[in-house]
């Protein structure tokens, strides 16, 4: 998991750095208050992904979805964990059901729940 996270993070940062020096390794590391060497090790899969707060900070700096970065790191955000823990059996069933559905079907369910009049 950490290699997928590191590879993705590095690809995003380097793609942005090609057009904007603010996305150099040093600049991004400084923006999230970590050492450049630590970020480099994360990107190369030498270090495990950082904690949730740092991942969310990286997502913000890189304009990426924090839930995607957390998932690549093998984690789920603490707010989602709290929601799941309130109704674990229902959410487990829901997620297992979603596993076999195509993306468009899951997106439709999300839209209906989000926009529904409850």
Image (spheres, rainbow, N blue to C red):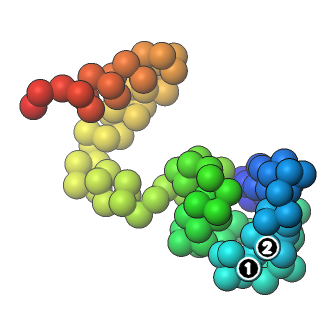
* Whole-percent x, y for residue 38 in the image: 81, 78
Nearer to the camera, 23 or 33: 23
Q: Disc 2 marks which residue?
A: 27
Relative to 93, say whether 14 is above or below: below
Q: Is residue 69 at least partly visible in the picture?
A: no
Residue drawn at x 27%, y 22% as measured from the top left: 112
Quadrant of residue 39 in the image?
bottom right
1 and 2 marks in contact (CB < 8 Å): yes
> Horizontal placement of 24 versus 31: left or right?
right
Relative to 116, say whether 38 is above or below: below
Q: Disc 1 marks which residue?
A: 30
- Asked which secondary structure carries label 2, the reply is helix
Quadrant of residue 3 in the image?
bottom right
Label 1 to label 2, Cα distance in Å?
5 Å
* Whole-percent x, y for residue 33 in the image: 67, 82
Residue drawn at x 85%, y 63% as measured from the top left: 21
Look at the image and tell me in which quarter the C terminus lies.
Answer: top left
Determine the residue located farthest toward the front in the rendered image.
Answer: 20
Nearer to the camera, 8 or 82: 8
> Horizontal placement of 96 versus 75: left or right?
left
- Give the tally of numbered discs: 2
Crowding near the residue tagged with mark 2, few <14, some 14–19, many ≥20 C-alpha atoms within 10 Å: some
Q: Is residue 57 at least partly visible in the picture?
A: yes
> Horizontal placement of 69 versus 15: left or right?
left
């Amino acid at each position: 998991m950490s290699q997928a996270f590191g590879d993705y993070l590095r690809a995003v940062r380097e793609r942005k750095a090609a057009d904007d020096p603010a996305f150099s390794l040093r600049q991004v590391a400084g923006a999230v208050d970590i050492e450049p060497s630590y970020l480099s090790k994360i990107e190369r899969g030498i270090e495990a992904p950082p904690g949730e707060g740092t991942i969310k900070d990286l997502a913000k700096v890189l304009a990426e979805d924090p839930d995607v970065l957390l998932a690549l790191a093998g984690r789920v955000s603490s707010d989602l964990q709290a929601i799941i823990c309130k109704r674990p059996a229902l959410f487990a069933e829901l997620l297992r059901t979603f596993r076999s559905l195509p993306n468009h079907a899951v997106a439709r369910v999300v839209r209906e729940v989000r926009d529904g009049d409850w």
